[in-house]
């Protein structure tokens, strides 16, 4: 029996519980949080090493054999996502120590933080569609608290909207699961896949597929369901924004990827065709937003939407190559988005505004910040040899091979415009005439900078070492494009 | 404006213990019959709320000087601990374990790890409901 698979879930859970007892003592909380998050990261790395050497790991909870009980499944994709989540969690935690403020820390910031990590890791790890809903809820509950914590006016306003949208989408999620259950009579994801393939192509399955696309599309912010995202992500402080931007939408993207490769492969012409069209429009909308705004937060937030579109375009193309590209790009985007959010968080702290027109000349006083941002921005756009390059080229090449020249063209063109949008921040924010900013308090730039520097180094290494990482990523994509591997591992037939 | 509500206060003193006892009964009935930690916990917090209505927040704080958020955390610790306990015996997460004991007079009784889990649920429910009610009540 392999209990390793549960550790990335149990460690954040126990850390969160223990942290509740120490809510008045901030120093103790910080130490416990650091230790807990490092242990989570170590367990996640160990788990994915095990998955790489020994194949897919599963655990049937409370000893109920699959498909009757809830099964936890860690294949290559989910285990590397868990590693990335834990890494981003750790880095955002470091950043929080000096920026989130003692008031928030005393009001259960750290416990909620760990519940969020638990929810995200759980959603990646579970092999049961209803259990996935449960972990979504854990994650959402935590995100409601993080969004509203601090209670400024904009936070309260956006939390109400965010709450409404997510309550509705959770309702739809349960309805979708209920429809699926009434058709196939099982909740185990591998078993659903088997049953759906026996059933063959039928209208009701296509309806359910679209319903799932709506549910996960709301979470993952695809066109036309992204409307809540720019407002909601604008409200909270930088580390929370980084967590949300890097993790929450990606859980939606992961869920679409999982369901559209494992379940709904009967009527590809319709379901994946729809996904393809939506993903292309998502990219276009995201790019328009990223170029149009002169607000640093908004620019990066719209870049999340672009990335979601790019990843899902790869999923919709649905070949092994495009899926490899999507997985590559997914991991890259999580790391680099977190880095960028943390970096603009520092900029906002220094200048006291998020309006790009009121910034300028930061490179003179903060060269480290400027050059880290420059590297991160290049990596985001996918300039070789940095991390975004390989994923994007695989997605584009697979798209062209599949005969989708328009879509691939849009993806290529979007990289250029993404580069333009992030360079706009660099040119207006860092170059130009230095201004005097009135700071209420001294900004601990050195400490804050360590967090995005760690992530940017990871992104650079991820790009440079993509040759070495290729076997891992292609194993992940192999499981996606060939569900038999997943099914065999879970049902042990 | 505080009226001296003698009838309610006197009745509460008796009813409170009946409700609490019944909630304990419900809690233990839970495994084979309707009941369990959740409903037991709700009933226990119902008893505390009755106390709160009959007297006031200050009195309740004096009688039960706990931080109910920590009660919730303690409950979570119980529940999560039971869930993880299986791992130490090389069993999957959440696996339960039980045995029968035969004490004199009482006869056959079952000992079940689910009880510890349910204790956790009980504490979480009491903690959460009381936190919510106290938070709302405070603003008055």
Image (tube, coloured by chain):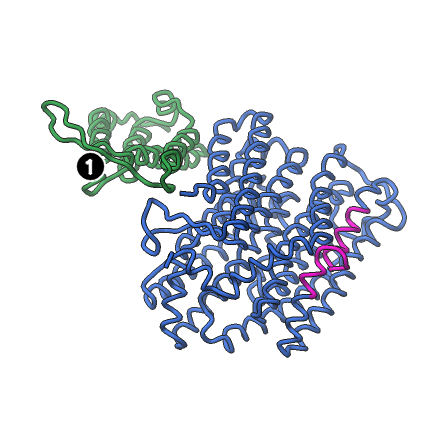
Chain colours: A blue, B green
Q: Nearer the viewer, residue A402 or A253?
A: A402
- Asked if residue A392 is positioned above or below residue A342 in the image, the reply reads below
Q: Judge from the rendering whether residue A249 lies leftward or rightward of residue A420; answer left or right.
A: left
| Residue A32 location (% of width, % of height) | 55, 29
Q: Which residue reaches farthest right?
A: A433
What residue is drawn where x is 40% and y is 71%?
Answer: A197
- Asked if residue B101 is positioned above or below residue A337 in the image, the reply reads above
Quadrant assignment, res A278: bottom right
**Quadrant location, the C terminus of chain B:** top left
- Main SS, magenta region, reads helix
| Residue A275 location (% of width, % of height) | 55, 71
Q: Can residue B96 be seen in this view?
A: yes
Q: Judge from the rendering whether residue A369 lies leftward or rightward of residue A405; answer left or right.
A: right
- Asked if residue B121 is positioned above or below residue A199 in the image, the reply reads above
Q: Judge from the rendering whether residue A489 lies leftward or rightward of residue A223; answer left or right.
A: left
Quadrant assignment, res A196: bottom left
| Residue B133 location (% of width, % of height) | 39, 36
Q: Which residue reaches farthest front?
A: A53
For label 1, count other residues whose C-alpha is less than 10 Å away and answer few (under 14), some (14-19) or many (20+).
some
Q: Is residue B128 visible?
A: no
Residue B61 belongs to the span the image colors magenta: no
What residue is disc 1 on? B29
**Quadrant location, the N terminus of chain B:** top left
């Amino acid at each position: 029996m392999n209990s390793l698979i549960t550790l990335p879930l149990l460690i954040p859970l126990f850390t969160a519980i223990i942290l509740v007892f120490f809510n008045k003592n901030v120093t103790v909380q910080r130490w416990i949080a650091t230790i807990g998050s490092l242990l989570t990261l170590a367990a996640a790395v160990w788990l994915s090493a095990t998955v790489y050497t020994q194949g897919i790991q599963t655990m049937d909870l409370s000893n109920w054999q699959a498909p009757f009980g809830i099964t936890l499944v860690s294949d290559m994709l989910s285990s590397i996502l868990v590693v990335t989540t834990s890494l981003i969690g750790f880095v955002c935690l470091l950043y929080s120590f000096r920026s989130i403020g003692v008031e928030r820390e005393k009001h259960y910031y750290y416990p909620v933080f760990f519940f969020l990590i638990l929810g995200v890791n759980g959603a990646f790890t579970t092999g049961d569609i209803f259990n996935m809903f449960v972990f979504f809820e854990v994650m959402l509950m935590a995100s409601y608290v993080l969004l509203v914590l601090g209670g400024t006016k904009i936070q309260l306003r956006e939390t109400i909207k965010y709450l409404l949208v997510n309550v509705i989408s959770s309702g739809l999620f349960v309805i979708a699961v209920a429809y699926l259950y009434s058709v196939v009579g099982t909740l185990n994801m591998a078993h659903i896949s088997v049953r759906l393939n026996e059933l063959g192509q039928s209208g009701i399955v296509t309806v359910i597929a679209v319903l799932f696309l709506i549910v996960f599309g709301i979470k993952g912010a695809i066109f036309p369901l992204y409307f809540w995202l720019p407002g909601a992500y604008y409200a909270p402080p930088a580390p929370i924004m980084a967590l949300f931007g890097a993790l929450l939408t990606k859980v939606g993207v992961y869920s679409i990827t999982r369901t559209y490769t494992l379940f709904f492969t009967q009527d590809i012409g319709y379901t994946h065709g729809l996904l393809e069209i939506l993903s292309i429009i998502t990219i276009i909308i995201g790019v328009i937003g990223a170029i149009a705004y002169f607000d640093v937060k908004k620019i990066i937030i719209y870049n999340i939407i672009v990335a979601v579109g790019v990843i899902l375009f790869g999923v919709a193309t649905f070949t092994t190559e495009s899926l490899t590209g999507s997985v590559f790009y997914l991991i890259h985007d999580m790391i680099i988005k977190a880095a960028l959010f943390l970096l603009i968080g520092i900029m906002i702290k220094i200048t006291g505004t998020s309006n790009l027109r009121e910034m300028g000349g930061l490179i003179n006083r903060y060269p480290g910040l400027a050059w880290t941002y420059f590297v991160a921005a290049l990596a985001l756009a996918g300039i070789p040899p940095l991390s975004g390059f390989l994923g994007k080229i695989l997605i584009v090449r697979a798209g062209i091979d599949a005969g989708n020249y328009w879509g691939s063209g849009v993806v290529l063109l979007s990289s250029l415009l993404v580069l333009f949008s992030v360079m706009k921040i660099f040119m207006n924010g860092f170059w130009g005439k230095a201004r005097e900013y009135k700071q209420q308090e001294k900004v601990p730039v050195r400490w804050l900078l360590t967090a995005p520097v760690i992530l940017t180094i990871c992104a650079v290494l991820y790009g440079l070492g993509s040759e070495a990482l290729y076997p891992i990523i292609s194993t992940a994509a192999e499981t996606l494009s060939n569900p038999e591997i997943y099914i065999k591992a879970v049902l042990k037939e | 404006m505080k009226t001296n509500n003698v009838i309610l206060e006197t009745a509460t003193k008796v009813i409170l213990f009946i409700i609490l006892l019944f909630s304990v009964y419900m809690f233990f009935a839970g495994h084979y019959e309707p009941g369990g930690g959740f409903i037991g916990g709700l009933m226990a917090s119902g008893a505390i709320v009755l106390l709160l209505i009959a007297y006031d927040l200050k009195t309740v704080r004096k009688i039960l000087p706990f931080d109910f958020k920590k009660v919730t955390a303690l409950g979570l610790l119980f529940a999560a601990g039971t869930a993880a306990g299986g791992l130490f015996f090389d069993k999957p997460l959440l696996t339960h374990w039980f045995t029968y004991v035969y004490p004199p007079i009482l006869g056959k009784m079952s000992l079940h790890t689910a009880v510890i889990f349910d204790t956790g649920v009980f504490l979480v429910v009491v903690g959460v409901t009381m936190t919510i009610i106290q938070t709302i009540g405070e603003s008055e």
